[in-house]
Amino acid sequence: MIPKLSKLLVVFLFFSCTIKSEEYEITILATNIANFGGVGEWSFSALLENEKESILFDTGFDEDTVLHNAQLLGKDLSKVEKVILSHFHGDHTGGLLKLRKTYMKINPKSFSTVYVADGFFEQRYDIDGNLRGFIGGFDDVNEFIKETDALGINFKIIKEPHEISENLILSGPVERIFERVVVSPGFYVKENGKLVDDLLKDDQSLGIKTKKGWYMMSGCGHSGMMNTAHKFQQIEKKDIYGAIGGFHLFRSSDAVISKTASSLKSFGLKQLVGGHCTGIHAARKIADIASITTNNLSHGAIGTVITKDLKILRSSVE
């Protein structure tokens, strides 16, 4: 019979390991800023890692960017079996096929399961009605599907909030309530045979449940930061403790940024790691209005890390 103290120790160790496995370290693998051999570009990608698995959020623009930066940072991407694509644009999907081709030789399941929101596969057009796409360089969506089928990639289409792993919740399509959608200039879809603006209904974000609240990850945030934060609070009423990624505020007016910042402050935002299309000016203004401390603000660069206890480890260029 195990002594009472030993039983308590076993329970404590088991519970501690369980908690630890639910937490993720986040490393930025693609964004605008880089140094010391890293490749920076107009894109986004981040790796989430814990003891159980590695998951990639977005895949960068050029097919070699994430590959190069991961190798530079000593990240083994052969462990990545689940991929999240925030939306169809090529600066978030461009690396997918090369990553699958590279790592399936090591692990047949690498990059084999890809989560996209409903609307991802809708055909896009230019103003003249010609096929136009950004999906990994393909204009014709059907050609993209043929290529991914041949590579054994299985797409999971998300229509509503969905837990893809412990404490990782995909928003699915986000309702546009508080702010106007950031449309994609020059891209159109067909409704009743007519070309209309593409409202990027396939834009989705990842919500990470942490001890301090939600940690929100977006590729471009085309749905809007306020709308996305509201979506996660509808799923579970927790503060939006942190946000990381692209939030498409780089061309926004000070009035729009101020409104967004005030809303995020009310949602409980305490940490911001901007990147890609967020804009340095926007990030700093949000931090000022939301009273985010200097140690909790980062502009995000290749190699920036959010530790499991939610501390920012800055890259050398920040």
Image: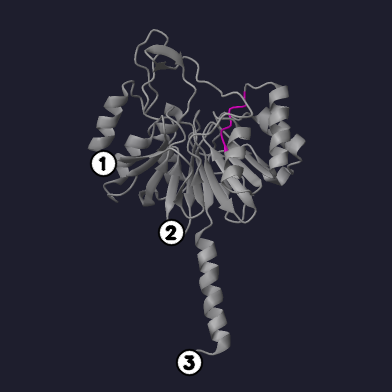
Image quadrant where residue 250 sits: top right
**Mark in the foreground, 2 or 3:** 3
> Residue 207, percent across and down?
54, 45
Residue lying furthest front? 192
Secondary structure under tag 3 reads loop
Determine if the magenta segment contains residue 240: no
The type of residue carrying mark 3 is Met
- Could you say whether the residue bearing mark 2 is in a helix, strand or loop? loop
Residue at point 37%, 52% (across, down): 79
Residue 1, numbered label:
3
Label 3 near label 2: C-beta < 8 Å? Answer: no
Check residue 152 in the rendering and tell me which mark sits there, or answer none: 1
Type of amino acid under label 1: Gly
Mark 1 against mark 3, which lies toward the viewer? 3
Residue in the image at 58% along x and 34% along y = 275
* Residue occupied by mark 2: 52
What is the magenta range?
A: 245-250
How packed mark 3 is, by other alpha carbons closer than 10 Å (few <14, some 14-19, many 20 or more), is few
Pointer 2 or 3: first along the chain: 3
Most prominent secondary structure in the magenta stretch? loop
Alpha carbon separation for disc pair 1 and 3:
51 Å
Quarter of the figure that contains the C terminus: top right
Quick check: 55 left or right of 25?
A: left
Q: Residue 293: give x, y in percent of width and height.
A: 74, 44
Residue 315 appearing in the image: no
Q: What secondary structure is found at the residue carrying circle 1?
A: loop
Q: Tell me which residue sits at (42%, 27%) in the image.
A: 90
Out of 313 and 214, give the one closest to the viewer: 214
Q: Earlier in the sequence, mark 1 or mark 3?
A: 3
- Pointer 2 or 1: first along the chain: 2
Residue 247 on the magenta span: yes
